[in-house]
Amino acid sequence: MTEQSKCPISGGRNQIKSDRIGGGIGTKPMNADWWPKRLPVELLHSPSSKANPYGPDFDYPSEFASLDLAAVKKDITEMLTTSHDFWPADYGNYGPQMVRMAWHAAGTYRVADGRGGSGEGLIRFAPLNSWEDNGNIDKSIRLLEPIKQKYGRKLSWADLIILTGNCALEQMGFKTFGFGGGRLDSWEGDDSTYWGPETEMATQDKRWTGKPGTEEYDLENPLGASRQSLIYVHPEGPFGNMDPISAAQEIRITFSRMAMNDEETVALIAGGHAFGKSHGASPKSHLGPEPNAAELEHQGLGWINSNGTGNAQYTTTNGIEGAWTSNPTRWDNEYLENLFKYEWEQTVSPAGGKAWKPKGGAAADAVPDAHLEGVRHPLMMMTTDIALITDPEYRKICERFVEDSTLLDDAFARAWYKLTHRDMGPKNRLLGPEVPREELIWQDPIPALDHEVVNEQDIAQLKKDILASGQSISALVSAAWASASTFRKTDFRGGANGARVRLEPMKNWEVNNPKQLASVLETLEKIQSDFNGKQSGNKKISMADLIVLAGCAAVEKAAHDAGVKVSVPFVPGRMDASAEQTDVDNIAVLEPMLDGFRNYRKGKYAVETERMLIDRAQLLDLTAPEMTALVGGLRVLGANYDGSKHGVFTEKVGVLSNDFFTNLLAIDTKWTPADDAKETFEGKDKASGKTKWTATRADLVFGSNPQLRTLSLAYAASDGHELFVKQFVDAWHKVMMLDRFELQHELYKN
């Protein structure tokens, strides 16, 4: 190259200076940084199946069935009393810290949306693995790695963590209620769950309204924990106020949000604090960063302590120091006995943690040091412990447990089982020889199939009877959707099986249009009675099956009326739950406050309607195309909860056309807000000014969001109608089948 032809830019056009490389994949600023209010549609596709090394055909139930559970438990039990220098066991037994690990893995569960819990082993990933409340649980996970390596794909991390908690309890003398396997591991962290509005860990200044101790003190929905980066409540009381009365109030609010009543709450605290100790033996200033901020050379371990050996007697976790009982590795009732036995006064640990000790130097040498021979310490209680004997209702329960320790044995066993299995769904999802025979009301029991199911000929005749019944396409579709769309993949609750849509409280939810639903159910009950009455053998159809079949028949006819011949799949075998098998309070939490699929909004919310539509789609395990097809189809089928015209962009209601998409995307329509909150809109013809359509935010988002608009264009295209109908039918069938766990569908097999 001649001097004249050289690039005048220093270094040459194709040369890259290594010291000028500014960023790689995922380096800020990213889209979310530039536009923080953007709708995160991509979260519907997480976690990605590509992250799973076992592939899409991995069948965990089969792998778990080949496991020798007794051998696994033997290995875990041996690990519990084999101390390692990198993290010496308190009192020579890792049991207490493994109970804490299992508790904190499960304790994130909350009833409002079913999120959290132990089901995917998410405590291994951000943000949970780096929460302040989970300090040093990374060491417990590390101790389990050899066992996980030994059993590989036969035992998920999620199952291993809970099983280890059970083994620890049993090794320390407690008889557990049982164990059910079947938890499917996630292979990446959860970036979708809302854990609260605070942007700093260990704060709670934004999630509460009112002041502690007042009736106005209330926690933001759907949150369960009282504080950012905590599992339950601040051990020093609300905002660290050391007030047992307001601490009891916060405990009750928080534990109820996590599906626990007063007795279960007391049992869990009393049972959990029968073991182990809290750690605050050295100043927190010696602690290094949490795992997600730790240096590369620490290999995923966080909270490296620079004081002394950094572990054993120098361990600091939450900053409170001490044990609740004199023998922290033995199951007994001493925790409650100690609560009542002594008067308590405040004390401060070397780490600055505020707690309580017996007054006047009582029980000053009651507890042996966890590591140093001949050194002893006084008993310790947290403010949240003192709350149990300060609150009148909690105190009554404590008194009963003190008088008869067998009551605590049973209550803690059941509460621990509920804590660690609450997000597992119905009993038929649980695997292994230790699954209890008893079916518990919080598992939403459904009778086992006890009859011969309908065949193809029966199905064809029933479809004819349904379509000739006088019920509209809209009403039949709405009833089936109301029954099935209660499903939540987060805790495997809800769904069409059981037909609880015909029972309290579901049948009277506003979102289900009770008057229309009652009419459909009455019609279907007559069809069911006529059909079952004509059978000579054991063949029957349940209402659960018939409600779904009615929706399928309606969708099929609506597609045919649109010129697309499809066969909507129907798989019989559902059963009907009884009122006795239905806990009204337990079911009430499934009621949607906002359901964009039916253009339903119960009240005013700080969260945008379209964001809550994405939220509900994620609970239904829907992809963005599935959500888009379902919304577009439900609109033209007239499935709005109140029969309104919002989003019904068609003149042919009840026909499965792609009109929703073609009319939404029409360039001759101008949309303007119809209310100050910008929840409803009018679409007017640009030329004439005449109102053509009305819509909500859950409709217009399919034209405003780039990703959803692209999908809408695919369905609105000249060759998009059949594609839309096929994808609507596929997505419809998926929702109808979400709770058919006995068929081992893909949601369960992973």
Image: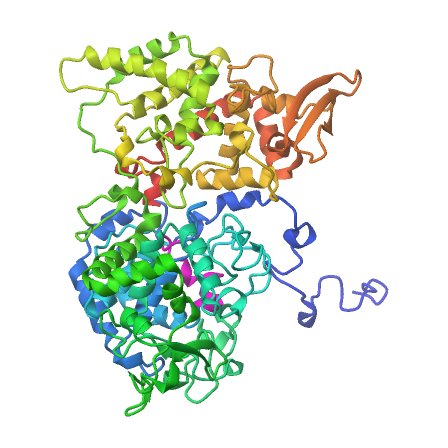
Q: Read off the magenta span.
A: 117-133
User: What residue is drawn where x is 42% and y is 23%?
Assistant: 479
- In the picture shown, does residue 436 fall above or below 238? above
Using the rendered view, name the quadrant where residue 164 is placed. Answer: bottom left
Magenta region includes residue 123: yes
Question: Residue 39 location in percent, x, y?
Answer: 61, 43
- In the picture shown, does residue 271 fall above or below 464? below
Magenta region includes residue 615: no
Question: Residue 503 location in percent, x, y?
Answer: 34, 28
- In the picture shown, does residue 663 fall above or below 24? above
Question: Residue 80 location in percent, x, y?
Answer: 25, 73
- Total numbered badges shown on the rendered structure: 0
| Residue 493 visible in the snapshot | no
User: Furthest residue to the left?
Assistant: 537
Left or right of residue 300, residue 669 in this image: right
**Which quarter of the image is occupied by the C terminus?**
top left
Question: Residue 275 location in percent, x, y?
Answer: 29, 71
User: What residue is drawn where x is 28% and y is 92%?
Assistant: 374
User: What residue is drawn where x is 33% and y is 28%?
Assistant: 499
Using the rendered view, name the quadrant where residue 279 is placed. Answer: bottom left
Q: Nearer the viewer, residue 149 or 525?
A: 525
Using the rendered view, name the quadrant where residue 75 is placed. Answer: bottom left
**Which quarter of the image is occupied by the N terminus?**
bottom right
